[in-house]
Image: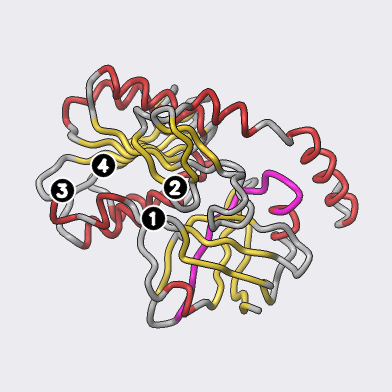
Amino acid sequence: MYKVIRNEKISPNSYLMEVIAPETIKKAMPGQFVIVMAKEDSERIPLTIYDFDLETGVLSLIYQVIGASTEELTTIKEELFAVVGPLGKPNEICANYEEFKGKRIVYVAGGVGIAPVYPQVKFLKNHGFDVDIIYGSREKDLLLIRDKAESVARKVSYATDDGSYGEKGFVTSILEREIENYDICVAIGPVIMMKNVAELTKKYQLKTIVSMNPLMVDGSGMCGACRCEIEGKPKFACIDGPEFDGHKVNFDLALKRMNIYKEEEKEKWAQMKKRLGRD
């Protein structure tokens, strides 16, 4: 069991959870993730490592309520049954930062995608990089940790679908306008956003890294649920990723696989809300 010291709402559908997990974070790197279980009989939930403190042993996670399992996670106040990690490969730039010295880097984040973007930009700033962020969401209230993002980035540009904060429109509009200023793009967020970014950067031959977040069960490559198609070959996000070359990902297949259990999940979520008295 892992002691929970914080689990509170930070936006209409997102929560920040802090857990005491010193062994889990001992060798953690930006870009990696953990799998948590709310209770012994709960489903496994993959969550990106948002932040961690080696001195206190605190692991910080940001999650979005998108189904029954994350709905259940909001009820946890004292202990999590399991926290497994760190899993996956670290971000390529952070793991090999000496090789990228002098490169002009932009991160494109969508919605809760800012959670994995923040630790990477923080790490790079601590190693002498000046990194820009382009951050978008549907509306102002869904933009998370703006202060933290601004504290580590050289510049943060915002876009909202409804124009309630920053520029009205999509992150791709800002990126295309400034694309000649960069050597590398890292895009993390909804699959459709990453697809649009990758299609844009491919036209300009801008190296692009994306972070895939498909269905995942065990996180060890055994179940095959997180299978992605990269350059026509099967890869597993949990052990081969979660980051891949954005110009080699079959995004159409990824979008299709995301909807496999959509109806079943909708029914289970409704049952969970009813059990919790939230229907």
Q: Secondary structure at mark 3?
A: helix
Q: Where is residue 202 drawn, in percent x and y?
A: 29, 22
Q: Secondary structure at mark 1?
A: loop
| Extent of the magenta region | 57-69
Q: Which residue is mark 2?
A: 242
Q: Does the magenta run of residues contain 58? A: yes
Residues tagged 2 and 1 counted as in contact (Cβ below 8 A): yes
Question: What kind of residue is marked 2?
Answer: Pro
Per the rendering, the mark at residue 89 is 1
Q: Nearer the viewer, mark 1 or mark 4?
A: 1
Of residue 265 and residue 129, the one placed in the foreground of this image is 265
Q: Secondary structure at mark 2?
A: loop
Q: Disc 1 and disc 4: Cα gap in Å?
A: 23 Å
Q: Which residue is mark 3?
A: 100
Residues packed near mark 1 inside 10 Å, few (<14), some (14 to 19) or many (20 plus): many
Q: Disc 2 and disc 3: Cα gap in Å?
A: 20 Å
Q: Secondary structure at mark 4?
A: strand
Q: Nearer the viewer, mark 1 or mark 3?
A: 1
Question: What kind of residue is marked 3?
Answer: Phe
Q: Does the magenta run of residues contain 21? A: no
Q: Where is residue 107 drawn, in percent x and y?
A: 32, 40
Residues packed near mark 2 inside 10 Å, few (<14), some (14 to 19) or many (20 plus): many
Q: Where is residue 54 drawn, in percent x and y?
A: 38, 78
Q: Residue at x 33, y 20 (%)?
A: 200
Q: Earlier in the sequence, mark 1 or mark 3?
A: 1
Per the rendering, the mark at residue 157 is none
Per the rendering, the mark at residue 132 is 4
